[in-house]
Image (cartoon, grey):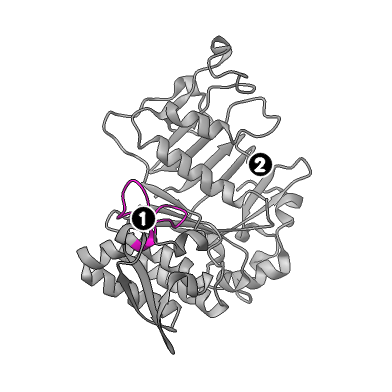
């Protein structure tokens, strides 16, 4: 499990250090850096799952903080070791990809026992080692989830934006009927109006197309059901996939869901965590109802300071937390305290 995160010069995350739990939720104003934390985690995990991590540099450098005078650096702690990635550009990328390379410092990935260790002293990653979890950053879009067109290149896998949901679910139904039934039970737990899922071969090029039987209405196509139903389906497809990731990053976890459905979803995710000790969730939300099902220790608050940089801290560090911890839920505390206090006190996470 990833226990700590350190991010420098990536988007608004100019110098952010934060602890993670097995289930951590970030809450804060729009554009305060919540989703950027999830993106940074996904990028770092991906650099450790490819043979040539420098191929990721362009993607990471695109997020270099505006005005940064140093490289972007992403780091996480797992079992006492820090796994890190540093871009090479010290000021800004050259205008042309092959220009002025002599002026660049070295970079790449490495391991250290301290997050402050200079990159020249990092140790290499042992050959064949995969120290970081396989991640997926789910930014599901209802329009992509509704389309029956299979994802490429593997039609049995749903893309992070929800493309290929129909064929991915059809693959589960055919290859693992027990999991297919469990998925439908979990769906009805959150969206009780769903009676059954099934497929027809009426998608593009005779690909599977999802059909939903609802209470009072049978044979609805995916584009005839609510956004919330589709978003829950996409999440369940990721959770029940045969090659399920170990780190699931969920943007806008509450989107499109009734407050009761949000609470049911958190309960379901906790059950999945209990059954899968290798799994970790990191999510963002704007819902006090969802936060009401979270422990205060699992909630991280974000806000921008006057310089436009993200400040992040645990809800438990609010100065009035000791007084109210036994009286209010995390959602109630957020509704009353807000997030600006993290900038006013700037307590290190």
Q: Is residue 183 left or right of residue 229?
A: left
Q: Is residue 29 left or right of residue 22?
A: right
Q: Tag count in the figure?
A: 2
> What residue sits right under mark 1 in the picture?
150
- Front residue (pair 223, 205): 205
Q: Residue furthest bottom?
A: 216
> What residue sits right under mark 2 in the picture?
12
- Front residue (pair 225, 46): 225
Image location of residue 135, percent across then percent down: 40, 48
Q: Is residue 165 left or right of residue 261?
A: left
Q: Is residue 198 left or right of residue 317?
A: left
Q: Is residue 81 visible?
A: no
Q: Which residues are magenta?
A: 149-166
Q: Earlier in the sequence, mark 2 or mark 1?
A: 2
Residue at 56%, 31% in the rendered image: 61
Which secondary structure, mark 2?
loop
Q: CA distance from mark 2 to mark 1?
A: 35 Å
Residue at 31%, 64% in the rendered image: 208
Q: Is residue 284 visible?
A: yes
Answer whether residue 34 is magenta in the image: no
Displayed quadrant of residue 78:
top left
Dot in front, 2 or 1: 1
Q: Residues within 10 Å of mark 2 (few under 14, many from 20)?
A: many
Image location of residue 214, percent across then percent down: 42, 83
The image shows residue 332, relative to residue 205, as above or below, that is below
Which secondary structure, mark 1?
loop
Residue at 34%, 39% in the rendered image: 131
Task: Say the numbered circle drawn on residue 172.
Answer: none
- Front residue (pair 269, 317): 269
The image shows residue 15, relative to residue 337, as above or below, that is above
Look at the numbered discs 2 and 1 and tell me whether their residues touch, using CB distance below 8 Å: no
Answer whether residue 165 is magenta in the image: yes
């Amino acid at each position: 499990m990833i226990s700590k995160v350190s991010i420098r010069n990536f988007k608004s995350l100019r110098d952010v250090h934060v602890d993670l739990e097995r289930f951590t939720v970030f809450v804060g104003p729009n554009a305060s850096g919540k989703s950027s934390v999830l993106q940074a985690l996904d990028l770092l995990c991906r650099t450790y799952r490819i043979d040539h991590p420098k191929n990721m540099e362009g993607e990471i450098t695109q997020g270099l903080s505006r005005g940064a005078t140093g490289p972007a650096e992403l780091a996480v702690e797992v079992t006492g070791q820090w796994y890190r990635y540093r871009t090479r550009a010290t000021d800004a990328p050259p205008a042309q990809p092959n220009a002025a390379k002599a002026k660049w410092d070295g970079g790449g990935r490495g391991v250290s026992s301290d997050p402050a260790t200079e990159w020249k002293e990092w140790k290499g990653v042992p050959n064949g080692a995969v120290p970081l979890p396989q991640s997926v950053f789910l930014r599901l879009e209802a329009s992509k989830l509704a389309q029956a067109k299979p994802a490429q290149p593997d039609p049995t896998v749903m893309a992070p934006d929800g493309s290929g949901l129909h064929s991915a679910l059809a693959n589960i139904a055919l290859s693992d009927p027990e999991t297919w039934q469990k998925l439908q039970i979990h769906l009805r737990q959150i969206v009780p109006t769903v009676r059954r899922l099934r497929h027809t071969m009426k998608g593009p090029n005779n690909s599977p197309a999802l059909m939903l039987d609802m209470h009072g209405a049978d044979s609805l196509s995916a584009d005839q059901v609510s956004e919330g139903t589709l978003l829950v389906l996409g999440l369940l497809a990721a959770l029940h996939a045969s090659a399920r990731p170990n780190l699931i990053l969920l943007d806008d976890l509450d989107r499109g869901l009734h407050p009761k459905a949000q609470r049911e979803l958190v309960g379901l995710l906790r059950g999945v965590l209990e059954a899968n000790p290798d799994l970790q969730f990191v999510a963002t939300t704007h819902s006090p109802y969802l936060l009401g099902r979270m422990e205060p220790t699992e909630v991280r608050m974000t806000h921008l300071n006057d310089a436009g940089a993200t400040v992040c801290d645990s809800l438990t560090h609010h100065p009035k937390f000791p007084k109210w911890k036994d009286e209010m839920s995390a959602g109630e505390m957020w509704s009353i305290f807000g997030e600006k206090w993290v900038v006013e006190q700037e307590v290190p996470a």
